[in-house]
Image (cartoon, grey):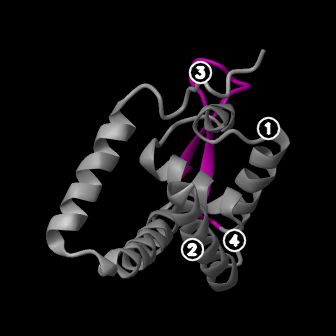
């Protein structure tokens, strides 16, 4: 439960800050993150990265587009499909958000010395690289 507490507390602080500072809910900035990281993906692809209802993603993409942070381009292969691309303003904003999130993480992990921090990050990488992060036998649905 300690890991859940750390993640939830950090998310609470980070998300509140971003909501207040940028008037942007977590769905919006995480979608912006996905679009900047994977330019050209489609709105329905975002569901595979962040499990959210399609109507939520559609509203968020519309919000980001209205703010000039992303743009939609009709696919050459399928006229109904639209690829999402970040604008320079979207990329700059995400860089600003990521810098603040990293500053927060440094603040949170400042209680660890360098060796403890290195050990912690190595353990996180090991867990993240495994196949049990997003799948569970313990919480398998019957």
User: Do the numbered discs 3 and 1 sit on residues whose CB atoms are within 8 Å?
Assistant: no
- What residue would you read off at disc 1? 54
- What residue would you read off at disc 4? 24
Q: Which tag, 3 or 2, sits closer to the chain's start?
A: 2
Numbered mark located on residue 43 in the image: none
Tell which residue pokes out farthest to the left in this image: 115
User: Do the numbered discs 4 and 2 sit on residues whose CB atoms are within 8 Å?
Assistant: no
- In front: mark 3 or mark 1? 3
Residue at x 69%, y 32% (from the top left corner) = 44
Q: How far apart are marks 4 and 2 (CA)?
A: 12 Å
- In front: mark 3 or mark 4? 3
- What residue would you read off at disc 3? 137
Residue at x 28%, y 57% (from the top left corner) = 120
For the magenta stretch, what is the residue range?
A: 68-86
Q: Distance between the residues labelled 1 and 2?
A: 24 Å
- In front: mark 1 or mark 2? 2
Give x and y (percent) for residue 138.
62, 26
Q: How far apart are marks 3 and 2 (CA)?
A: 31 Å
Q: Is mark 3 on a helix, strand or loop?
A: loop
Is the residue marked by circle 3 packed among few (<14), some (14-19), or many (20+) residues within 10 Å?
few
Q: Is residue 76 magenta?
A: yes
Q: Distance between the residues labelled 3 and 4?
A: 35 Å
**Quarter of the figure that contains the C terminus:** top right
Q: Quadrant of residue 139?
A: top right
- What residue would you read off at disc 2? 14
Residue at x 68%, y 69% (from the top left corner) = 67
Is the residue marked by circle 2 packed among few (<14), some (14-19), or many (20+) residues within 10 Å?
some
């Amino acid at each position: 439960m300690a890991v859940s507490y750390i993640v939830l507390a950090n998310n609470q602080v980070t998300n509140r800050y971003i909501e207040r500072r940028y008037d942007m809910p977590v769905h919006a900035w995480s979608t912006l993150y996905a679009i900047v990281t994977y330019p050209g993906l489609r709105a329905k692809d975002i569901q595979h990265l962040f499990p959210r209802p399609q109507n939520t993603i559609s509203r968020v993409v519309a919000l980001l587009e209205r703010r000039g942070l992303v743009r939609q381009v009709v696919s050459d292969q399928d006229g109904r499909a639209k690829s999402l691309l970040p604008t320079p303003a979207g990329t700059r904003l995400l860089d600003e958000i990521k810098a603040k999130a990293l500053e927060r993480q440094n603040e949170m992990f400042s209680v660890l010395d360098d060796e403890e921090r290195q050990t912690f990050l190595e353990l996180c990488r090991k867990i993240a690289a495994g196949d049990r992060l997003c799948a569970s036998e313990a919480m398998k649905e019957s």
